[in-house]
């Protein structure tokens, strides 16, 4: 089993606005850092050749979606909290509106199966509506793959 994660955020301004220009400039290097991180399996993106583009979807123009798959919880943790990604994460309030609901979710997927954006959004809705469980959880309420449904 691999660990899928999705996080979403609403920008304080459109992607082409000066208020988020620094964030947009950081997309490519931070995505490249993830792509090269130990345990990285896959990342949702519009094109295999464009790592900087924000994924386009039907969930609202101001919503940014980030979704990836990792071999283990530790691999994802190390990327999020023990790499240069942490410095960008710590500045999220400069670029993103304050989230009222939970904005990040994790779940297990069989090796080789890649989740869709719709699946990730459904897992996030499940977490927001019912709290953590084997189908949708966070680092704080982490579930092992043995807890995942078949």
Image (spheres, helix red, strand yellow):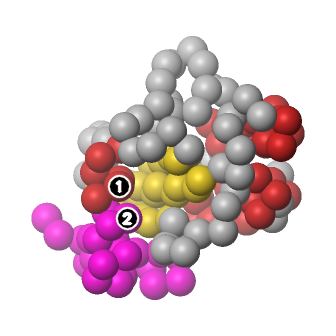
Q: Residue at x 66, y 68 (%)?
A: 98
For residue 124, the mark is 2
Q: Is residue 44 visible?
A: yes
Front residue (pair 63, 112): 63
Q: Main secondary structure of the magenta part?
A: loop
Percent position of residue 132, x then y: 36, 82
**Residue 133 occupies quadrant:** bottom left
* Disc 2 to disc 1: CB gap under 8 Å: yes
Q: Answer whether residue 84 is magenta in the image.
A: no
Few, some or many residues within 10 Å of mark 1 (<14, 14–19, 20+)? many
Percent position of residue 103, x then y: 51, 66
Q: Residue at x 29, y 46 (%)?
A: 118
Q: Residue at x 71, y 52 (%)?
A: 12
Q: Answer whether residue 139 is magenta in the image.
A: yes
> Which quarter of the figure is the C terminus placed in?
bottom left
The magenta segment is 123-150
């Amino acid at each position: 089993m691999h660990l899928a994660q999705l996080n979403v955020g609403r920008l304080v301004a459109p992607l082409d606005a000066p208020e988020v220009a620094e964030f947009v400039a950081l997309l490519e290097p931070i995505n490249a850092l993830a792509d090269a991180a130990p345990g990285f399996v896959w990342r949702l993106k519009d094109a295999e050749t464009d790592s900087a583009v924000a994924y386009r979807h039907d969930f609202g123009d101001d919503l940014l979606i980030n979704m990836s798959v990792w071999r283990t919880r530790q691999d994802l943790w190390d990327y999020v909290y023990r790499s240069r990604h942490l410095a960008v994460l710590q500045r999220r309030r400069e670029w993103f509106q304050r989230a009222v609901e939970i904005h990040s979710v994790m779940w297990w997927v069989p090796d080789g199966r890649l989740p869709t954006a719709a699946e990730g959004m459904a897992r996030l809705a499940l977490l927001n509506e019912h709290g953590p469980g084997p189908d949708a959880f966070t680092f704080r309420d982490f579930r092992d793959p043995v807890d995942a449904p078949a």
